[in-house]
Image: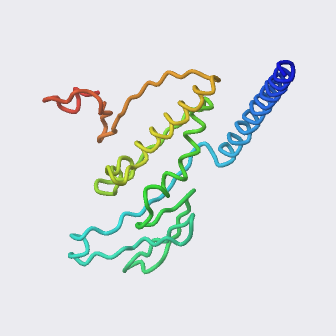
Amino acid sequence: QLQTAQATADHFSAKYHELEARFQEEQIIRKKYHNQIQDMKGSVRVFCRFRPLAKREEDLGDIPVLHKADAFSVDLHRLAPHNDTRRFDFDAVFGGDSPQEEVFGDCEDLVRSVIDGYNVTIFAYGQTGAGKTHTMYGTSDHPGLAPRAIDSLFHLIHREEKQGRKTFTVKAYMIELYKQDILDLLAERRDQNPKDQK
């Protein structure tokens, strides 16, 4: 019985090592195809997200002039004296009712690319009140891109380290471009003016 048990253990051990080797091969292939897809999508992607009208804007009688034509296009309906429509194309378009999960869904693959060694930058651009803070940070109930990306990143790191394939060192900084100044958002502000926070 001892010999039988040893033979069974040896069989399962060999099977385990075979599966582990196959898994490693699959991971290499997955990484290759994942990053090929990211490269095909382009190194720079521009998304458009609508902000719903605020109550104050509705009370003033403002009306939306941008309309989502499809998943990649936005129509701008210009009023008099133009009275025409212009179309703009993006890599993705999110309507005013798009939840944070949907927006992050189009960025989530980029976090995987970070683990694979690629440099990735995600930022929001727009005028004051356009909804940049909501998109990037959100709320505790509806977190934005930054907290979701950080959660996803550490989840992937934990998984990779648990499998013993890689070790990671994480460094972070957070900046804001304010007018012509770059502000370090993690610096202690106290009574500093923006120029002192560069």
Left or right side of 59 for 138: right
Residue placed most toward the observer, 24 or 82: 24
Residue at the extreme left of the image, as rendered: 191
Q: Quadrant of residue 21?
A: top right
Looking at the picture, does residue 65 appear above or below residue 41? Answer: below
Residue at the extreme front of the image, as rendered: 1
Residue placed most toward the observer, 160 or 3: 3
Total numbered labels placed on residues in the image: 0
**Residue at left offset 54%, top offset 46%:** 108
The colour mode here is rainbow
**Residue at left offset 56%, top offset 62%:** 89
**Residue at left offset 65%, top offset 23%:** 165
Residue placed most toward the observer, 177 or 147: 147
Residue placed most toward the observer, 129 or 160: 160
Residue 31, given in percent of the width and then of the height, sits at 70, 36
Image quarter where the N terminus lies is: top right
Looking at the picture, does residue 96 appear above or below residue 28? Answer: below
Residue 9, given in percent of the width and then of the height, sits at 80, 24
Residue 17, given in percent of the width and then of the height, sits at 79, 25
